[in-house]
Image (cartoon, rainbow, N blue to C red):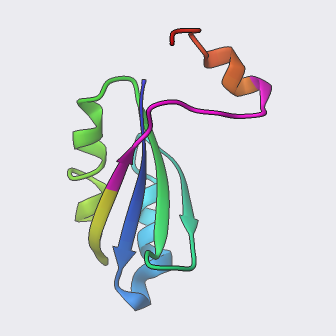
């Protein structure tokens, strides 16, 4: 599994429209409107690392109103939920 957090800058008047378009892209789990240096944060997940190319530069970056992205690759997920434990392969 390849997971990433994508920081997204948008045109000021297109934050909501961009968020709605981004959340419809296959592989995008969640999109958050945030305060700070970026406008949106997207959580992305795909079975294979190569799939991130289709999702981020091939999808998110091409959404109308998106000015730029920064991708943070996830190495490991820490969670208090039982759901995350179900996906843990136990590999360290």
* Magenta region includes residue 1: no
Residue 81 x/y as whole percent:
78, 31
Of residue 80 and residue 22, the one placed in the foreground of this image is: 80
Residue 89 x/y as whole percent:
56, 10
Residue at the (36%, 75%) spot, across then down: 9
Residue 65 x/y as whole percent:
31, 78
Region rendered in magenta: 71-82
Instruction: State the predominant SS element of the stretch in magenta.
Output: loop
* Magenta region includes residue 73: yes
Residue at the (30%, 45%) spot, across then down: 55
Q: In screen coordinates, is 10 left or right of 75?
A: left
Image position of 89 with respect to 55: above or below: above
Residue 86 found in image quarter? top right
- Residue found at the very far top of the displayed protein: 90
Residue at the (43%, 75%) spot, across then down: 38
Residue at the (64%, 33%) spot, across then down: 78
Q: In screen coordinates, is 27 left or right of 33?
A: left
Image position of 29 with respect to 19: above or below: above
Residue 52 x/y as whole percent:
29, 39
């Amino acid at each position: 599994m390849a997971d990433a957090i994508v920081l997204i800058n948008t045109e000021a008047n297109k934050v909501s429209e961009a968020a709605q378009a981004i959340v419809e892209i296959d592989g995008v789990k969640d999109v958050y409107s945030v305060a700070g240096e970026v406008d949106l944060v997207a959580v992305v997940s795909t079975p294979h690392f190569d799939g991130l190319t289709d999702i981020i530069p091939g999808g998110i970056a091409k959404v109308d109103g998106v000015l730029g992205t920064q991708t943070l690759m996830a190495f490991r997920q820490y969670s208090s939920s039982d759901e995350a434990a179900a996906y843990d392969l136990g590999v360290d």
